[in-house]
Amino acid sequence: MQITKAMELVASSKFRRAKDRAEAVRPFFEQTYKLMAEIAAEDPYFNSQFVHKRTDNEAMILIVIAGDRGLAGGFNSNVLKIAQAKIDELKAKGGNPVVMPIGQKAVDYFEHREVKILKAYDHVAERANIYLGIQMAEEILDAYKRHTSVQNVEIVFTNYVSPISQVAQSMQVIPLTNLAGNHPRKCAVEYEPSPEAVFDKLVPQYVAGLLYGAIVESFASEQAARRTAMENATDNATEMIENLSLQYNRARQGAITQELTEIVGGANALE
């Protein structure tokens, strides 16, 4: 009980900091996405390699963000189940999934599976920054551009909803389909040398912001899940101690009563 209570307090402390980081990164991601939507809506003939779907391709890059430690309820298993389901679905179609695991639990899981790993990252969530997101984005986009067989890039992470609710989900990163439809109104801005060139320069920043935001969201979710799990474990341990103490006291009282009865019986026999 003392250990789980201490882990609950540590998770609570980390959770508050992670929640602040998650809220701070959202405006950057939202503004980048809005600007890209404006560019895509500006030109009816807009064309970019990151917008159109690649047809008849069989490969997929799957980014999976899990935790570095356990004892967090179903946090890790929920993410890994979604990722494994996507991998199994693609393999059933004859596809070739490539995974980028982030977090020790994700790395350990996929190292023991028959799946190709693009690059593994462990113990980076707590100290993650936008520069780490940029590094990951460059590796992913480089692989996407070099391998024309890669149809799409998806990310599986845990979205922080509230201290008691964290939802594991998947999101498509590339291609950015239906982007223009999310911002139908045009703006009076001229892009040089072209909208496509500016858009392609923004994509790495967008992917970096998305990755960094997903890592921070997952870390906040992990701490919230661990805090809840440790709180439940502490409550269960407290209840167990109370029940055992009650049983012990009853047994001790019964033993004392039995001894007193024997002493009184012996004294009466001597009289």
Image: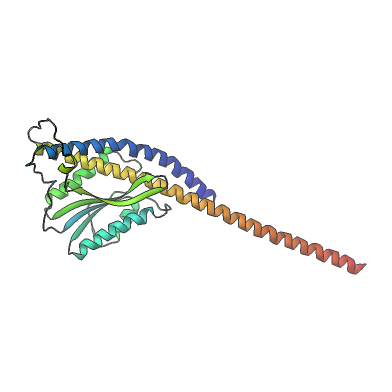
User: In this orientation, which residue lies closer to the viewer: 33 or 220?
Assistant: 33
Residue 240 seen by the camera: yes
Q: Quadrant of residue 202?
A: top left
- Which residue is situated farthest in the right direction here? 271
**Residue 103 vertical position relative to residue 33 in the rendered view, above or below:** below
Residue at screen point 61% across, 57% down: 243
- Which residue is situated farthest in the bottom direction here? 269
Residue 67 seen by the camera: no
Q: Quadrant of residue 215?
A: top left
Residue 222, percent from left and from top: 38, 48
Residue at screen point 19% across, 43% down: 138
Residue 179, percent from left and from top: 17, 43
Q: How many marks?
A: 0
**Residue 18 vertical position relative to residue 70 in the rendered view, above or below:** above
Residue 33, percent from left and from top: 21, 39
User: In this orientation, which residue lies closer to the viewer: 244 or 103?
Assistant: 244
Residue at screen point 76% across, 60% down: 256
In the displayed structure, does residue 238 sit left or right of residue 116?
right
Coloration mode: rainbow
User: In this orientation, which residue lies closer to the viewer: 77 or 108?
Assistant: 77
In the displayed structure, does residue 202 sit left or right of residue 256?
left
Residue 181, percent from left and from top: 16, 43
Which quadrant, please, contains the C terminus? bottom right
**Residue 258 vertical position relative to residue 64 in the rendered view, above or below:** below
In the displayed structure, does residue 16 sit left or right of residue 110?
right
